[in-house]
Amino acid sequence: MPILRFSAVAACAALLLSACTGLSPESRLRAGLEEAGLSPRMAGCMAERMADRLSLTQLRKLQSLASLRKSHSGAMSIDTLLHKVRALGDTEIFAVTSASAIACAF
């Protein structure tokens, strides 16, 4: 239980800090995708498409993926990212993310 409590506190702190930066949701999403291990080009392309299609609540759910980078060395594959996004349990987030990944891959 202490680990869960620490994770919740860390997530709240990260959310509060990101709210104070004055960055747009797209900028925060791009930074989060890069932090998760995507290339800057792919992260920028996907963030641009996703920020307009997802609600703020859904974008906040995606913030949890930034911690994925710690468990992976090197760049994260799109397959791994989509697997983790699907685990969030929100079909709309998964649909928007996978469509953005496909569109940005070309």
Image (spheres, helix red, strand yellow):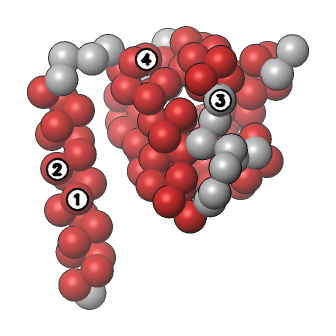
Q: Mark 4 points at which residue?
A: 26
Disc 3 marks a residue whose amino acid type is Ser
Asked if marks 1 and 2 touch (Cβ < 8 Å), the reply is yes
Disc 2 marks a residue whose amino acid type is Ala
Label located before the other in sequence (4 or 1): 1
Q: In which quarter of the image is residue 5?
A: bottom left
Under circle 2, the secondary element is helix
Label located before the other in sequence (3 or 2): 2
Label located before the other in sequence (3 or 4): 4
Under circle 1, the secondary element is helix
Q: Name the residue under label 1.
A: 10
**Residue farthest toward the right in the current orientation of the protein:** 106
Distance (Cα) linking label 2 and label 4: 19 Å
Within-10-Å neighbours for mark 3: few <14, some 14–19, many 20+: some
Disc 1 marks a residue whose amino acid type is Ala
Under circle 3, the secondary element is loop
Q: Where is residue 34 in the image (x, y as percent from the top left)?
A: 53, 34
Label located before the other in sequence (1 or 3): 1
**Badge number at residue 13:** 2
The C terminus: image quadrant: top right
Q: Mark 3 points at which residue?
A: 39
Q: Quadrant of residue 29?
A: top left
Q: Which mark lies nearer to you, 3 or 4?
A: 3
Within-10-Å neighbours for mark 2: few <14, some 14–19, many 20+: few
Q: Residue at x 12, y 27 (%)?
A: 20
**Residue farthest toward the front in the current orientation of the protein:** 74
Q: In this view, does 87 lie above or below 34?
A: below
Q: Report the side of 60 relative to 14 (left or right).
A: right
